[in-house]
Amino acid sequence: MTRLLDTIAIVAAILTIWLCLYAYAGEAAIAPPLRTLTFAVELFSRASFWNHVSATMTAFAIALTISGVLGVALGLLLGLRRFAGDVADPILSSLYTIPKVTLYPIMLLIFGLGMSAKVAFGVIHGMIPIMLFTIAAVKNIQPVLLRTALVLRLGPTKTALNVLAPAVTPEIITGLRVGFALTLLGVLIGEMFASQRGLGFLIINGMEVHDVRMMTTVTLLVVIFAIAANGLLLALDRRAHRFA
């Protein structure tokens, strides 16, 4: 019951802020809630809209897979090699703080327009935080666990599966949750600058042709998807930490 009331309060607060912004800026900047929802229903009936959704989800799935696999693999490698991890950690943290939009000209020259550029933007946004969380997870393994594995005379494979994996999984899941959101952000930015298809393209195109209704509606749909997906990942994250 408490969660339901909290959700209602949050939604009411968002709608209030939305209406206040609409009252302040007018239709030249933002569409009102009811008109946005009505247009969203209209978009759902357009085949062209679902083509844009498919383009975004395809690029996002590829980018998230690459970010997850490379981020976890490199994070484990650097974490297990303590000196390498100590050297890489501040470098990765510095790279993480760089506004990735500044890399747009280089990425565009390397990958050109289209799917590859969108995926690349998603990967550079999502892979680094996954690596950082994975490195931290390995570094924070309690020494008593490794000593116990030695006492029990577990081999490398059994130690990795029965000791290391359960110890690092919760933090890796947290990293994947953060990487999920940032990868989606990167793909959308890539579509804004380097694509003629996708939800990011619809948003930036709406700004260019001053289609406020399209811009507001697509932004709302992206936000709803991101919140719903993050909620599911957060529940998985909490469950993993509870049983860790």
Image: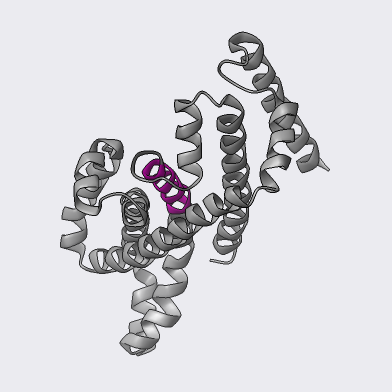
Quadrant assignment for the N terminus: top right
Q: Is residue 198 above or below residue 33?
A: below
Q: How many marks?
A: 0
Rendering coords of residue 223 (x, y %): 58, 40
With respect to residue 218, does 75 lie above or below? below
Write down the quadrant of residue 158 in the picture: bottom left
* Residue shown at the point (66%, 42%) measured from the top left: 43
* Observer-nearest of 156 and 60: 60
Q: Residue at x 33, y 84 (%)?
A: 150
What is the basis of the colouring in this image? one colour
Residue 90 visible from this viewpoint: no
Q: Is residue 152 visible?
A: yes
Segment tinted magenta in the rendering:
178-191
Percent across and percent down for residue 212 are 57, 25
What residue lies at 56% left-to-right and 36% top-to-bottom? Answer: 219
Q: Name the residue: 55% across, 31% down.
A: 215
- Between residue 77 and residue 212, name the one nearer to us: 212
Return the residue found at the far right.
1
Magenta residues: mostly which secondary structure? helix
Q: Quadrant of residue 37?
A: top right
Reply above or below: 15 against 45.
Answer: above
Instruction: Give x and y (percent) for residue 41.
Output: 73, 41
